[in-house]
Image (cartoon, helix red, strand yellow):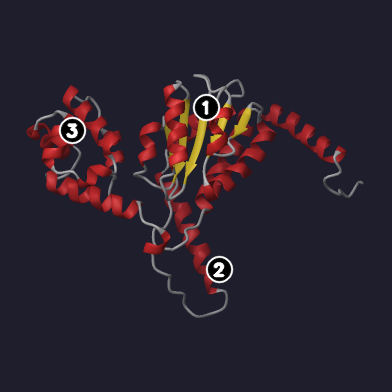
Amino acid sequence: MTSSLFERLAQLDRLTDGEQTLARYFENSYPKLAFQNLETVVQGSGVSATSVTRFVRRLGYSDFRDFSASVKDEVKANFDRPLQRGRESVSSGPATEMIQHFSRARTEIEQTLDTFSAEQFDEVADLLADESRPLFLVSVATGRTLLHYFYLLCKYHRGNVHMLSGIDMNSHELVDLTPDSVVFATAFDGHPMPVEATLKLARSRGATTILVTNRATSPLRIYSDHVLLVQTDSTPRFKSRATMLLMLESLLAAMENRAPERTLSRTKLVEEGSDQLNMFIWPDQ
């Protein structure tokens, strides 16, 4: 699997002042960077053409032309829409759709396990489990539905957690955002502007930001202190959210392991509330 531009940038150390300037320019200009020629990059970054060429070679590209072509391929692969993808062929046989879908999900899970950072996961889990830090959750569309599921189960593990309800209400709900806060965002496939705006606001107020995404080259990475990447097959018209869901559930399990007594206490309160509100029928009732 070819490394993305952001992955290559993350692997660099001991950058010169000029290289730091170019790294910031590449991050801030993405994805429009894919359509900029050498002259535009030089003018925009204020760094010489020789320095730009030397830097892209240090990133592993043979020259600026190779760099430009690779970034264009990344953008094309990571900013496609369902209409741009074809309907997948399904072989004949009983339950072939289910078998193919489950098989693809298994491959995506294995790829995620092969590529994820254990250190990054543990750092994110520590932040999410820290009840002293207000936790704000933000996503859109199907991501918001999955994150709402995460929010409900998160209430078993900690308090002081807030699910942002929508862009028209976010400014009110984020009025209490402080440097101690943690903003946890998910983005699947697209580049949701409400999520970007929230991450930018969080950064401006000194809050810690976390992103879970299936896009290795998501522009949202530049506003995120921590990134958890899940792998998805790029070919289906409608991709599976299985790896995203499993990542969220894994974080919930990690939160419980960090404060088991708190989870037990809160779970008892949730169940008592459910009984008092006559929510469910249990065998002993």
Which of discs 1 and 2 lies nearer the camera? The answer is 1
Which of discs 1 and 3 lies nearer the camera? The answer is 3
Does residue 45 appear anywhere in the picture?
yes
Between the residue at mark 3 and the residue at mark 2, the CA separation in whole angstroms equals 50 Å
Between the residue at mark 1 and the residue at mark 3, the CA separation in whole angstroms equals 33 Å
3 sits left or right of 285 in the view: left
Residue ranking furthest to the bottom: 92
Q: Earlier in the sequence, mark 1 or mark 3?
A: 3
Q: Earlier in the sequence, mark 1 or mark 2?
A: 2
79 sits left or right of 192 in the view: left
The amino acid at mark 3 is Gly
Where in the figure is residue 127, as x and y percent of width and height?
53, 27
Label 1 close to label 2 by CB (< 8 Å): no
Badge 3 crowding class, 10 Å Cα cut-off, few under 14, some 14 to 19, many 20 or more, is few
Where in the figure is residue 38, as x and y percent of width and height?
12, 41
- Residue denoted by label 1: 182
- Residue denoted by label 3: 44
Q: Which mark is residue 269?
A: none
Q: Residue at x 50, y 50 (%)?
A: 243
Which of discs 3 and 2 lies nearer the camera? The answer is 3
The amino acid at mark 1 is Val
| Kind of element beneath mark 2 | helix
